[in-house]
Image (cartoon, rainbow, N blue to C red):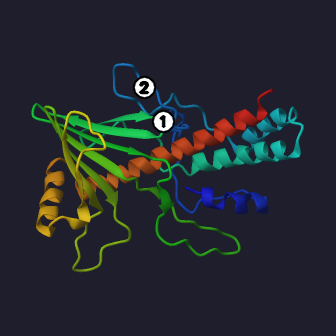
Amino acid sequence: MIRNVRFLRWAAGKSFTSGKSTTTTGASSQWNAGIIAQPRCSIATCLKPAMPAVSINQHSAVFSIASRQIHTKGERELVEFLAEEIVAEKKASPTATIPTSLNGFAITCNKADVELTKSSEREKVTISFNVNHTVDMEGEEAETTENKQEFSAMKSRPQFEVDITRGATTLSFTCSYLPGEAQEGEYNDVFGIDEVTIYQGEWNDKVYAVAGDVLDGYLYDLLMNFLEEKGISNEFAEKMSDFASAYEHAKYVELLEAISKFTVEKK
């Protein structure tokens, strides 16, 4: 993502080139603004019929016409900035499409909420998270030169719930991504267990839960192995972070477009 440098780009009055390399795709795979079509009785599809790519000049021209109906300087500047920002963010999109499944888990999207499910005759595994306020810089910010600016990508690393349900009983884990990188001799876990609980029926505030950092070390390792057997491995957690990053970016672009539309609409 490049939102952290949007003011610098606007203030300089220059076109921006993302430090991250992108691949040009056909119109059928252009990034869309994260609009979700969610059928009533089927898995949500986080896709939208693709629209042809729009150049910054074309986009600016459209908003220039619309901005003639805007009477305040602040609104006009906002619309003009958003026209370029939206195009730049779409070009910086981490992926052309949002998948509807991941390692056998079906993905359902509802605004900022995401749910992944996988069922068998014995149990149902559900992973749920929300992408709001989950992005941070990946790595250190690259050096800035006079002619070129390079910035680290932004990654979404949401806290997530894992519910393993058998009949009326649910074994539930609250998990978080671990900061930094493991050093030599340490475990290479991408995520850790924050809390564990088990309950019958629906969860409520009376259900007892234990924090992961007070669990017996061996028990903690066994629970991590248990999650891995259910498909929630370090590799899966990395892929889920990539998905969350792409989906959060789509929702960000959608937000920019909504603000622009709101600004130019007749009152």
Marker disc for residue 166: none
Is residue 95 visible in this depiction of the protein? Answer: no
Q: Count residues near mark 2 (Cα–Cα under 10 Å), then give few for <14, some for 14-19, many for 20+.
A: some
The local crowd at label 1, few if under 14, some if 14 to 19, many if 20 or more residues have their Cα within 10 Å, is: some
Side of 194 relative to 11 (left or right): left
Residue matched to label 1: 111
State the CA–CA distance, disc 2 to disc 1: 10 Å
- Residue 223 image offset from top left, x and y in percent: 15, 57
Residue 183 appears in which quarter of the rendering?
A: bottom left
| Quadrant into which the C terminus falls | top right
Q: Foreground: 212 or 158?
A: 212
Residue 75 horizontal/vertical position (percent): 81, 42
Query: Residue at position x 45%, y 47% from top?
Result: 131
Left or right for 93, reference 257: left
- Residue 265 position in % (x across, y down): 76, 29
For marks 2 and 1 on the same chain, the one whose residue lies earlier in the sequence: 2
Q: Which residue is mark 2?
A: 38
